[in-house]
Image (cartoon, rainbow, N blue to C red):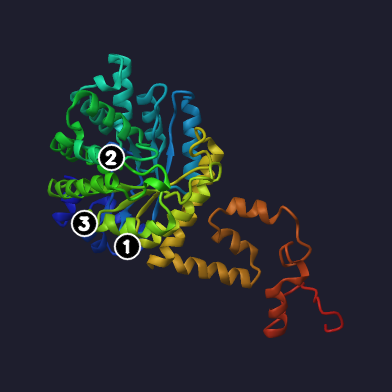
Amino acid sequence: MTQLELARSGIVSPQVKHVAEKEGVEIDSILQGLIDGTTIIPANANHTNLIPCGIGKGLKTKVNANIGTSSDFFDIDTELMKLRAAIDSGADTVMDLSTGGDISAIRRAIIASSPLPLGTVPIYQAGIEAIENHGAIVNMTTNEIFDVIEEQARDGVDFMTVHCGVTQASVARLKNQGRITDIVSRGGAFLTGWMLHNERENPLYEHYDRLLDLARKYDFALSLGDGLRPGCLADATDRAQVEELIILGELVERAREAGIQAMVEGPGHLPLDQVTANVQLEKRLCHGAPFYVLGPLVTDIAAGYDHITGAIGGAIAAAAGADFLCYVTPAEHLSLPDVEDVKEGVIASRIAAHAGDIVKGVKGAREWDEEMSKARKALDWGTQAKLSLAPEHWRQVHNKIPAAGATCSMCGKYCAMAIVDKYLRSPVPHLTSPFKGEE
């Protein structure tokens, strides 16, 4: 039985129990979220070292880190280093987006080393194998696509991005409207090329019931991909994007009817004033399904700093109700990310997620900030380090320029809180007053 089917039967799975304890919420709340489809727990039974993670309404906003090879650089050891960096930086899930080297071997090595839920985009492997075996992506067969999906499910993949909403109808909307960047999703591009060349419907849409059967067999969650997401601000919230979202909403309902967990992926590049509207649109059209957003990136001109661009959009999206942020690294649009890029991307998205959780009233979010504020007021540097989002980085920055006294080296003896504490309440030990003659 799937996690959804177990919940409907009133059975508390070990995964549900773990998520409830980790989130500090009632088990019944998790069960009801699974039943309603507003919460998912991606947990393939074949991922034996998995630590379960809940994604959805009322839970902490989660952060995903993308790793994986490219056709230009493929090394398993490097990907495992990226995985470790993602885990150490606090990512909640990881996706393997490998397109170079031995894709199956890389995925299996990552699964064996990852306690985090793992996601993939199976059309990548199917398309690349079609090039190797048949000379072109457009020559891949429907059976080959589903063979790859089942292979990845057998390996223990917990959630899969499947671009089921890229249909003849949604591509027609795209062609009629026109865009600056057309399609920036690799999976969306693979399938669009296949559909137009073969003059056939998307196999993932046409044979959606076959996909649901595999999802039920292995209990992997569907991440209904945004193959027509906007790749620049000018293309945001256009007819093609919304057409795809309408289709995905219908597919969410079919997945739930089949006992399958599903979430929906979203843009992409959005101007600030459209971020909240996009979250609300997804929640309405997709019946409250968890929303998984890339960024969103709120300007197109910040390449090299897009982890910041994405965090700005991610904070707004999370506050508006997005449940899951896919990180963006400084390498976005420029190169394959390295280990340092992974760290920067995870931390930036975690900041965004937490900022959103404060607004959403997620249990423990505001309390965390209040504890930090108390530690700052008390000049309790040890507690501040423990409460920091990234304690090791906190220590490196704090110790960069040593302080002479109890305050930090920015203000020294002119620390505002220390001065006020001296005269408003009680003295701070070892503090020299800046007001000469008033000791």
Q: Are the residues tagged 1 and 2 within 8 Å (C-beta)? A: no
Q: For mark 1, what is the residue?
A: 58
Q: Relative to 231, does residue 22 appear above or below in the rendering?
A: below
* Local SS, label 2: helix
Marks 1 and 2, how far apart in space?
35 Å
Q: Amino acid at mark 2?
A: Leu
Secondary structure beneath label 3: loop
Counting from the top left corner in percent of width and height, residue 405 is at: 77, 66
Marks 2 and 3, how far apart in space? Answer: 24 Å
What type is the residue that disc 3 sits on? Answer: His
- Observer-side mark, 1 or 3, equals 3
Q: Nearer the viewer, residue 132 or 109?
A: 132
Position in image of residue 35 (x %, y %): 18, 56
* Residue that label 3 marks: 287
Q: Position of residue 91 (x, y in %)?
A: 44, 47
**Structural distance between the alpha carbons of marks 1 and 3:** 16 Å
Task: Give x and y (percent) for residue 219.
Answer: 22, 41
Q: Mark 1 belongs to which amino acid?
A: Gly
In which quadrant of the rendered image does the N terminus lie?
A: top left
Helix or strand or loop: what does disc 1 sit on? Answer: loop
Image marks 2 and 3: residues in contact by CB distance under 8 Å: no
Neighbourhood count class around disc 2 (C-alpha, 10 Å): few under 14, some 14–19, many 20 upward: some
